[in-house]
Image (cartoon, grey):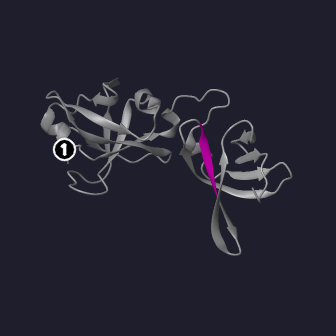
């Protein structure tokens, strides 16, 4: 185990938001590779949960809790520090660690803004009430986001893509776990 970090339980609502890339400097700072282009969740949470890297050298096992002292953008990347990570050697021991944050720690989304993690698994229904499938993933194409909808046809898994823009998306109801769209199954 890495000195000064305590073992923890992963929260039931934990979401993987990035990973630690490497040490940064000599005072225990580390570089973070966020999975989002807007890493607000990393900045809003002062408690990160770490799991070891899936591949490569594993310097710890289990779940560790890391109290974040500061996280910020520096030269186009995210860097962070913690009181428990006192020097470069300790920061290097975190290399590859996967970062999880409790979903309840995410900043509140603005009206008509959604976290991708909240959309995955929602049913997609068109205006006629026909179930088109479930959101399997989202893809950022630059100018817009695209919903990747999984469904079955003739007992074979299929995918359809629907741009996540107001022209096609009528309503997102997180409570009902449904997205209503202006889309036909043969598009």
Asked whether, in this view, residue 186 is left or right of residue 64, the answer is: right
Foreground pick, 151 / 108: 151
In this rendering, the answer to whether 4 lies above or below 135 is above
Residue ranking furthest to the bottom: 155
Foreground pick, 2 / 148: 148
> What is the secondary structure assignment of the residue under circle 1?
loop
User: Residue at point 61% right, 45% down?
Assistant: 146
- Whether residue 3 is visible, yes or no, is no
- Which corner quadrant of the image does residue 18 belong to? top left
Foreground pick, 10 / 131: 131
Residue 116 screen position, x and y as percent: 56, 42
Q: Is residue 182 within the magenta segment?
A: no
In this rendering, the answer to whether 96 lies above or below 154 is above
Which quadrant: the C terminus?
Answer: bottom right
Residue 8 screen position, x and y as percent: 34, 45
User: Residue at point 50% right, 33% down?
Assistant: 106
Asked whether, in this view, residue 3 is left or right of residue 139, the answer is: left
Asked whether, in this view, residue 99 is left or right of residue 96, the answer is: right
In this rendering, the answer to whether 94 lies above or below 27 is below
In this rendering, the answer to whether 129 lies above or below 95 is below
> Range of the magenta residues?
144-149
- Which corner quadrant of the image does residue 85 belong to? top left
Q: Residues within 10 Å of mark 1 (few under 14, many from 20)?
A: many
Residue ranking furthest to the right: 128
- Whether residue 141 is visible, yes or no, is yes
- Per the image, the residue denoted by label 1 is 93
């Amino acid at each position: 185990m890495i000195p000064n970090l305590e073992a923890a339980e992963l929260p039931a609502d934990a979401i993987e938001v990035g990973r630690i890339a490497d040490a940064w400097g000599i005072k225990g700072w580390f570089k973070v590779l966020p999975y989002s282009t807007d890493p607000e969740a990393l900045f809003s949470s002062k408690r990160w949960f770490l799991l070891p890297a899936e591949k490569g050298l594993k310097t710890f096992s289990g779940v560790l809790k890391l109290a974040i002292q500061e996280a910020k953008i520096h030269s186009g990347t995210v860097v962070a520090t913690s009181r428990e990570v006192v020097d470069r050697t300790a920061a290097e021991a975190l290399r590859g660690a996967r970062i999880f944050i409790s979903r309840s720690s995410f900043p509140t989304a603005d009206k008509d803004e959604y976290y991708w993690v909240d959309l995955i698994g929602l049913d997609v229904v068109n205006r006629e009430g026909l179930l088109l499938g479930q959101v399997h993933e989202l893809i950022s194409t630059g100018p817009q986001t695209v919903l990747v909808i999984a469904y079955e046809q003739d007992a074979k898994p299929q995918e359809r893509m629907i741009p996540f823009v107001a022209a096609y998306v009528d309503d997102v109801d997180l409570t009902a776990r449904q997205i209503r769209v202006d889309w036909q199954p043969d598009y």
